Amino acid sequence: MNKFCLAPENGLAIFPNGRISPCCAYDDVEDEMPKHPKDLMSYLNNPALKNVIHKQQTQNQHPGCSKCISKEQFSKTSQRQLFNKYAPFSPGIKHLDLSLSNLCNLKCRMCNSFLSTSWQKDDQLLGRPVHKRRDFSMDWLIQNQAHLQNLETIEMKGGEPFMHGEYLKFLQAFESQLPNISLRITTNGTTIPVWINELKKFKQVRISVSFEGTDEIYQYIRGGKYSFQDFENNFKTLLKMFQDSPHVEFKPMFTFQIYNIWNFSLAWQWATQFKNQFQDQIVLERFTNIVFKPTYLNPQLIPHSLRLEIIRELEPLDHTNLINYISLMISPDIENNQKLFDEFKTFTKTLDQSRNENLTTVEPRFQRLFDAIF
């Protein structure tokens, strides 16, 4: 398997805790990347990064890159493949991946306080590490702008990026470069920032709007703050704001997990309804993303008989590639099933009690899952 990747030499990923690495998928298992480096050149000359680059150039797999290799073994698109398809190698930072804050207005069940400040109370309840709000200063990027003149793509993530006022400072400082940069931004679609129209200045924009289901399942997974109708109304507002901007497209992204295994068909029908209404504004390629962590929410955990039932429910969709993809996603058995099932039950029961919710009330078919397992 080809292990070469452009990310170590062309990529820069920034996290709320000040960590900087080649990309969002890199894991500090061998060469730990620096936190809060003095400037960009300090990072680029860091021995850890130099070692990663050396191993990439000699076709040796670096342990920090194992996530991509694992994804590719399961025929999933990896960050490495996304990097390598854009352009041949040339010096300089081409791709900027920004996760500047863990500030978020939702507490989705598959998340944690490292990525969402709304999760702090629940992490404490579950006995997990509690992360305070962290914000990476946009001033650092602006001070290093001279080394970021070759940018071609930017990704904005969170927390929830639409809640972060610092992005306006970034957009204003880099304004002259924006017409040459393509932007990808991931949002939960529940809020609209005052700087939203600044996005029209980019060369091309793709706004991935994540959602975890329709109706009550949506509200259950996301922590109860917003109804699915609230989300839908906000999504329509976003679409109308950019209806005269053909270079801006929206991509609904269904986050597939054990809680929404019976909701996929409804979610797809909802997304295609918007596609029919808004046409070129909506992109449905790679519609779904699977939850791998925490493992006890991975849909691969469900019993074989229920997998077959879910596949049968997808057949009326008349979308062969999509059905094959979902079949692949839920086909492998996860080891230590009973242990993970126990974790899933405890996790669900604890959050249900804390949030005054009940999974089997929201989706009665989960009682069958509990009966089959426990």
Image (cartoon, rainbow, N blue to C red):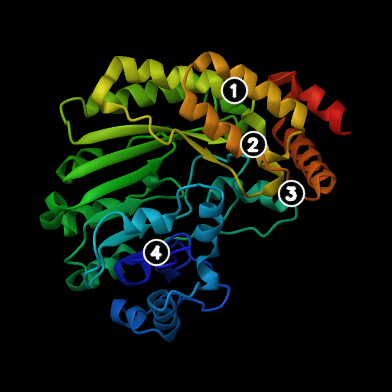
Cα separation between marks 2 and 3: 30 Å
Image spot of residue 336 (x, y percent): 81, 50
Residue at left offset 51%, top offset 47%: 75
Q: Residue 263 carries which label?
A: 1
Left or right: 91 as drawn, with respect to 42: left
SS label for mark 3: helix
Residue at left offset 44%, top offset 62%: 15
Q: Which of marks 3 and 4 is nearer the N terminus?
A: 4
**Does residue 174 appear anywhere in the picture?**
yes
- Mark in the foreground, 2 or 4: 2
Identify the residue position indicated by label 3 in the image. Answer: 125
Q: Which amino acid does label 2 sit on?
A: Ile
SS label for mark 4: strand
Cα separation between marks 3 and 1: 28 Å
Image spot of residue 327 (x, y percent): 60, 32
SS label for mark 1: loop
Identify the residue position indicated by label 2 in the image. Answer: 330
- Mark in the foreground, 1 or 2: 2
**Is the Cβ of the residue at disc 3 closer than 8 Å to that at disc 1?**
no
**Is the Cβ of the residue at disc 4 closer than 8 Å to that at disc 1?**
no
Q: Which mark is residue 14?
A: 4
